[in-house]
Structures are given as structure tokens and as C-alpha cells.
């Protein structure tokens, strides 16, 4: 989670009572199957404010700086991840995913940045390794003469960390000739003629699931967040159910549902054997300690005390080749948006 987060205040936008806004969905189809989706304002909306225009941006974001259009193209990909201090897991997950992105884009500059400033500092102190923040990475890319940047994220869904990614995009997009921002591997849910990223994720994730009998269950541990995106976990659960994978349930460390919530379900289902598995990019502190630790307050210990036979699977999502393919595909979307001209094709309209 982003450091130093206090109470979040979400401001409610207030509009003049006589103004009616119409939003039209525009789908942009580019080569390699890349899809750009954004809400564009109906022509009846005159003199749209910057805030209204920004609020209408969803999907892969694209910004072209007309003042810099005469500059030569020099392209790079910046991959943003929260990061981890667990070196072994980092090498198997984050580093391996970045290597896959590099392999998909030979000859292209690919840079990794961590959004957790605390983790950046700890790695520097412990390993002597300097991993830049996104801001530092972009400053260096600009210094080195790069003019077009595709921002890719290793976030799982658009929560607080992706808000950071989006803020970086907004703050730096005018410093480059062109900048794009890709989406997390779970973004679309099949709406507006888009793919169902959540179903695709579950299909990839399930390649590492154990076979479950009637008395077995799989508990998938996610992070949890105070951000409204915590609702994605409920969507993941519906896709797990729809995939008919057996007693597979998602719970969170810091959000809802929690371990107590799913334990009620285990009791109802007469489950005896439980496998625990993290749904996190890396197998770091949460996986090793909160989930699988030997302390009495770990989830494993709580389940054992309740009489369940517990097995733990301590591997980050980045170790799963099928998951890495999803991250590469999302990075490709950001790259394709960088390399192609944006085309506006009319879509159907939504009245607001």
C-alpha cells in the first residue's frame, strides 16, 4: 500500500443543476489487437473543463504533446511495480516478468521502477542496489533523450498503487512528445465490448491450483485495500465460482472479506483440508508471515487451531508463466498505443 496514507477524503463532484452531460463510448481498434477505450463527451457539451475531460479518460491512456511533435522518436518502456525486499521472490517474479517484457520488445529500452519509496530505500541499504522510483526513472529517460514513453504496470487491478501510476502519467506526460499508460492485468470485466480481464486472470491463476475434493478448499489470500477497488475481490470470487473450480475462496489481509469471513464458509461446506495461496505479485512478508507464519496470529495457525489440515503454497503470481503472459500483453497494449496513431470511431452513447 502507498506509504503515509491517512484518512482518504473523496470529494463529490457537483454540477450545475441545469447541465446535462452525455457520454459516448469510443472504441479504438489498432494493430496487434490493441483496444483503447475512453468516454468522449457528446458534442452537446460545450467548452468542457480540463477536470471533466480528465474524468472521462479510462482504459489505455494516451497523450501527445503537439509542442514537441518535431522532435525525433526515441522510445522506451517504463515498468512500474510496488516492489519487494524479498530478493529471492523479486528475482522469480518481478525480474522475470520484466525479462519477458524485454524479450517481447527486443532492442527497446525497458526500465523497472518501484513505486514504494520505502522498499527502494531498504534495497539500497541492504543490497547496495539502486532501483529508481517512477519519477527518478522518467527524469533519467528525459536526460538520455527519450521522447516517447510507454508506462506499463505490474499492478493486479486499479487500486491505490495504480492511482500512483496514473498520477505519474498526469504529472509527466507533457514533458515528453508522447506518453501512454497501460492498465493492470485486471481492469475490464467484459463491459462495453471489452474482454473479461478477471475471467482471463482466473483462468491463468488456476493453472497452479491443486485438485480439490468435496472436503478440500483453496483459500486465496489477497492484500485488501480501503480503496473502492476492494470490490474487485468480489468480482474475482464470481469468476472463481463460474469456473467451477471447487471450494476456492478469496480473502484479504487488510480488507474484506477477511479470514474470519471465509472460515464461516469452510464450516458450512464441511471442509477438512485447506490449501493457502497468495494472490500477490510476490511472495513477500504477507505470504511468508501473515499467511504461512508460525506465529499464533498467522492465518495458517488460526486455521490449524480451528481443526483444519493446512498446506501452504508460497509463490508469487510472477512465478506463474500464464500470469506473466497477461502482464506482457498489457505492456504490449501500452506499447502499441505509443507506436500507432489514435483513431476515433463512433461508439454507442450513454446518457448521464
Image (tube, grey):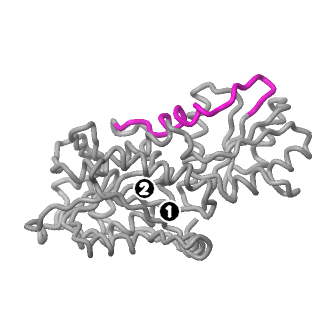
Q: Which residue corresponds to mark 1?
A: 161
| Sequence order check, earlier mark of 1 and 2 | 2
Q: In this rendered view, identify the residue nearer to me: 330 or 54.
A: 330
- Where does the image place residue 16, in percent across and percent down from the top left? 31, 69
Distance from the alpha carbon under mark 1 to that under mark 2: 9 Å
Q: In this rendered view, identify the residue nearer to me: 349 or 146.
A: 146
Q: Which residues are magenta?
A: 194-217
Q: Secondary structure at mark 2?
A: strand
Magenta span includes 34: no
Q: How many marks?
A: 2
Picture residue at 69% right of the left edge, 57% below the top: 286
Picture residue at 84% right of the left edge, 57% below the top: 297
Picture residue at 35% right of the left edge, 38% below the top: 194
Q: In this rendered view, identify the residue nearer to me: 152 or 19.
A: 152
Residue 80 sits in quarter:
bottom left
Assess whether mark 2 and mark 1 are in contact (beta carbons under 8 angstroms).
yes
In screen coordinates, is 230 left or right of 293? Answer: left
In screen coordinates, is 154 left or right of 67? Answer: right
Magenta span includes 213: yes
As displayed, is residue 239 above or below residue 334? above
Q: Which residue corresponds to mark 2?
A: 153
In screen coordinates, is 251 left or right of 35? Answer: right
As displayed, is residue 80 above or below residue 280? below
Picture residue at 61% right of the left edge, 48% below the top: 316
- Label at residue 91: none
Q: Secondary structure at mark 1?
A: helix
- Where does the image place residue 338, in percent across and percent down from the top left? 23, 54
Amino acid at each position: 500500500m502507498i506509504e503515509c496514507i491517512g484518512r482518504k477524503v473523496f470529494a463529490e463532484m457537483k454540477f450545475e443543476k441545469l447541465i446535462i452531460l452525455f457520454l459516448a463510448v469510443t472504441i479504438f481498434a489498432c494493430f496487434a489487437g490493441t483496444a483503447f477505450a475512453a468516454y468522449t463527451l457528446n458534442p452537446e457539451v460545450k467548452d468542457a473543463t480540463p477536470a471533466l475531460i480528465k474524468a472521462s479518460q479510462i482504459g489505455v491512456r494516451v497523450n501527445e504533446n503537439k509542442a514537441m511533435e518535431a522532435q525525433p522518436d526515441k522510445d522506451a518502456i517504463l515498468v512500474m511495480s510496488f516492489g519487494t525486499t524479498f530478493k529471492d521472490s523479486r528475482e522469480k517474479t518481478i525480474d522475470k516478468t520484466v525479462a519477458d517484457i524485454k524479450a517481447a520488445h527486443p532492442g527497446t529500452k525497458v526500465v523497472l521502477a518501484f513505486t514504494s519509496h520505502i522498499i527502494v530505500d531498504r534495497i539500497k541499504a541492504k543490497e547496495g542496489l539502486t532501483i529508481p522510483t517512477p519519477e527518478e526513472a522518467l527524469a533519467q529517460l528525459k536526460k538520455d533523450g527519450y521522447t516517447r514513453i510507454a508506462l506499463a504496470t505490474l499492478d493486479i487491478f486499479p487500486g491505490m498503487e495504480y492511482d500512483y501510476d496514473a498520477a505519474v502519467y498526469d504529472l509527466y506526460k507533457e514533458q515528453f512528445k508522447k506518453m501512454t499508460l497501460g492498465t493492470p492485468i485486471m481492469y475490464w470485466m467484459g463491459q462495453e465490448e471489452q474482454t473479461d480481464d478477471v475471467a482471463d486472470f482466473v483462468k491463468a491463476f488456476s493453472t497452479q491450483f491443486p485438485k480439490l475434493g468435496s472436503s478440500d478448499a483453496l483459500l486465496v489470500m489477497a492484500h485488501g485495500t480501503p480503496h473502492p477497488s476492494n470490490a474487485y475481490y468480489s468480482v474475482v470470487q464470481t469468476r472463481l465460482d463460474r469456473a467451477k473450480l471447487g471450494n476456492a475462496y478469496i480473502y484479504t489481509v487488510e480488507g474484506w472479506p477477511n479470514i474470519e469471513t471465509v472460515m464461516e464458509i469452510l464450516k458450512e461446506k464441511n471442509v477438512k483440508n485447506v490449501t493457502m495461496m497468495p494472490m500477490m505479485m510476490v511472495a513477500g512478508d504477507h505470504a511468508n508471515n501473515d499467511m504461512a507464519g508460525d506465529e499464533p496470529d498467522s492465518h495458517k495457525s488460526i486455521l490449524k487451531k480451528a481443526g483444519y489440515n493446512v498446506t501452504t503454497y508460497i509463490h508469487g503470481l510472477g512465478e506463474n508463466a500464464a500470469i506473466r503472459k497477461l502482464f506482457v500483453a498489457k505492456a504490449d497494449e501500452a506499447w502499441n498505443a505509443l507506436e500507432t496513431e489514435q483513431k476515433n470511431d463512433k461508439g454507442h452513447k450513454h446518457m448521464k
